[in-house]
Amino acid sequence: MKKLLSLLVVAAAALSFNVAMAHGTKAQHGGIVATAQDLGFELTNEGDKATLYITDHGQPFDTAGLSGKLTVLSGTEKSEVELKPVGENKLEAQGVKLAKGSKAVATLTNAEKKTLTVRFSVK
């Protein structure tokens, strides 16, 4: 079951990467880019902190009403941390490390309780 879940995450990450390139999304902060529902996402990692930047057609997207979690799959290890808004267009998660080869899934919920999932593959 874990192998199936990992395979699905890998396949979704590959699709997310292709969509990001098709939309012309480029890393502005040295992170990993993806797109979902016409929004651009960039995931960065520094120490034990992950930052998720969100843009809407190249413009900063207001994250004030968002909440979420970041799930990281690294080999057989799985960790989940809360994503919290910390600025105009970013959310942060403390206590997480994105190691090479790991997969990350950001699940975001807005004030209307609509959910959005974004997948990343760390290279």
Image (tube, grey):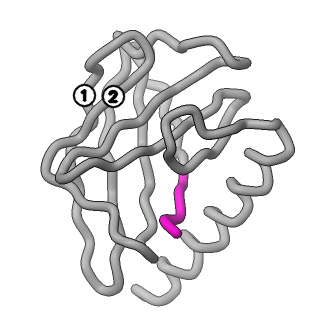
Residue 79 is drawn in which quadrant?
Answer: bottom left
User: How far across and down, in percent of the image, does residue 80 sit?
Assistant: 23, 56
Which corner quadrant holds the N terminus? bottom left
- What label sits on residue 91 in the rendered view? 2
Going by the numbered disc 2, the residue's amino acid type is: Leu
Q: CA distance from mark 2 to mark 1?
A: 5 Å
Q: Residue at x 54, y 54 (%)?
A: 119
* Label 1: how many Cα within 10 Å (few below 14, some 14–19, many 20+): many
User: Could you say which is closer to the camera, residue 85 or residue 48?
Assistant: 48
User: Could you say which is closer to the camera, residue 59 or residue 119?
Assistant: 59
User: How far across and down, in percent of the image, does residue 17 sit?
Assistant: 70, 56
User: How far across and down, in percent of the image, does residue 77 sit?
Assistant: 25, 79
- What label sits on residue 84 in the rendered view? 1
For residue 28, above or below residue 76? above
Going by the numbered disc 1, the residue's amino acid type is: Lys
Q: Residue at x 45, y 67 (%)?
A: 103
Which secondary structure is most common in the magenta stretch? strand
